[in-house]
């Protein structure tokens, strides 16, 4: 790949998309989505995907490309992102990867363990064992074959404990061994990154205001259309922030006010989780502060004074 690769991470409503568009326009670059919910078609308003005006200003990739019935994994996104980045480089352009899904950036910069597909039967058996045995006994059994995983997985984290056992049961090798063989990462020195870290109170206020605007701008219609498909509630798209809360309103289980308040609260929680991830896993990424797009751009240029198209 010959073009520069810029990574922009930040919590929801922090202004990362505006910065990405400004940068892409300045360098003639192309934007690549790194948000797990903006992948899905039909949820542009609810997930704050790019508007037609924005996509007209710079090429956008991996936005709205997946059907909500088709759940994408991190590995699938990574493969699609690498192919997209190769194409952008082949055109001699810069790539601007932007989003709020920390695991996507982790996979892109540090690689992803090449874990074989696990049959549904193994997943179901592992989940059943956990429910029957209880966490303590299940963790003890896991420690016998994968002590590293059993030691690092937090108490109460059923999902990761079950995942570790199902991988061992299906492959005969501990999850920790697979994770030690990470693949797919960008070459060292090929990318530059920033993380937006605004004051929490100001970010929460923006989250609340934006969700209210979304409800008035078509998010309810998007949720209504999604509900009409009767999809599996465990699919990733069905867990997008706002879907569950607005669906309750559309089913007549609550009024719009409480539904909106519940969605706003969940959005704030989501923003907090994203910020926590960045502070722990992206501690070495340069920070941009505040919420004003003009300030973000000034701070970005200060970090890269020689930036030219």
Image (spheres, grey):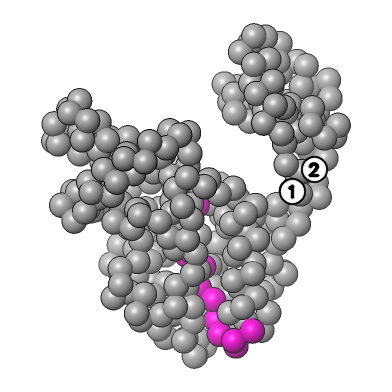
Q: Which residue is mark 1?
A: 113
Give the side of residue 308 with respect to residue 142, left or right: left
Residue at image location 61% in from the left, 78% down from the top: 87
Residue 280 horizontal/vertical position (percent): 55, 46
Q: Quadrant of the N terminus?
A: bottom right
Gap in Å between the C-alphas at discs 2 and 1? 6 Å
Tag 1: Cα neighbours inside 10 Å, few (<14), some, or many (≥20)? some
Can residue 221 be seen here? yes
Residue 14 horizontal/vertical position (percent): 35, 58
What residue range appears in magenta? 90-101
Which numbered marker is on residue 6?
Answer: none
Tag 2: Cα neighbours inside 10 Å, few (<14), some, or many (≥20)? some
Tag 2–tag 1 contact (CB < 8 Å):
yes
Foreground residue among 230 and 282 = 230
* Helix, strand or loop status at disc 1: strand
Foreground residue among 129 and 106 = 129
- Is tag 2's residue or tag 1's residue first in the polypeptide sequence? 1
Can residue 299 be seen here? no
Residue at image location 79% in from the left, 31% down from the top: 170
Q: As displayed, is residue 182 above or below residue 171?
A: below
Where is residue 260, by image quadrant? top left
**94 within the magenta span:** yes
Residue 11 horizontal/vertical position (percent): 40, 53
Give the side of residue 80 with respect to residue 48, left or right: right
Which residue is the extreme one toward the bottom? 309
Residue at image location 29% in from the left, 56% down from the top: 45
Q: Which residue is mark 2?
A: 178
């Amino acid at each position: 790949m010959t073009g520069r690769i810029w990574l922009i991470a930040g919590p929801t409503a922090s202004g990362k998309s505006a910065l990405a568009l400004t940068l892409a326009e300045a360098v003639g670059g192309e934007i690549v989505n790194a948000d797990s919910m903006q992948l899905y078609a039909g949820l542009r308003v609810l997930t704050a995907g790019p508007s037609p005006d924005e996509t007209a200003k710079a090429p956008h990739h991996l936005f709205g490309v997946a059907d909500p019935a088709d759940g994408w994994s991190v590995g699938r996104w990574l493969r699609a992102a690498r192919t997209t980045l190769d194409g952008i480089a082949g055109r001699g352009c810069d790539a601007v990867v932007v989003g709020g899904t920390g695991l996507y950036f982790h996979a892109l910069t540090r690689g992803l363990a090449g874990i074989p597909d696990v049959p549904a039967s193994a997943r179901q058996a592992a989940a059943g064992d956990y429910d029957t045995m209880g966490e303590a006994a299940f963790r003890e059994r896991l420690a016998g074959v994968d002590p590293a995983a059993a030691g690092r997985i937090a108490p109460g984290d059923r999902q990761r404990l079950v995942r570790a056992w199902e991988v061992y049961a299906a492959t005969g090798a501990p999850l920790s061994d697979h994770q030690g063989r990470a693949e797919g990462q960008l070459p060292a020195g090929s990318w530059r990154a920033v993380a937006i870290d605004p004051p929490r109170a100001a970010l929460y206020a923006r989250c609340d205001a934006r969700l209210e605007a979304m409800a008035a701008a078509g998010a309810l219609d998007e949720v209504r259309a999604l509900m009409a498909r009767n999809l599996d509630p465990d699919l990733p798209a069905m867990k997008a922030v706002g879907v569950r809360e607005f669906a309750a309103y559309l089913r007549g289980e609550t009024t719009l006010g409480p539904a909106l308040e519940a969605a706003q609260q969940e959005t704030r929680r989501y923003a907090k989780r994203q910020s926590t991830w960045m502070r722990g896993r992206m501690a070495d990424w340069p920070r941009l502060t505040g919420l004003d797009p003009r300030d973000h751009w000034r701070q970005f240029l200060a970090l890269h004074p020689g930036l030219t198209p």
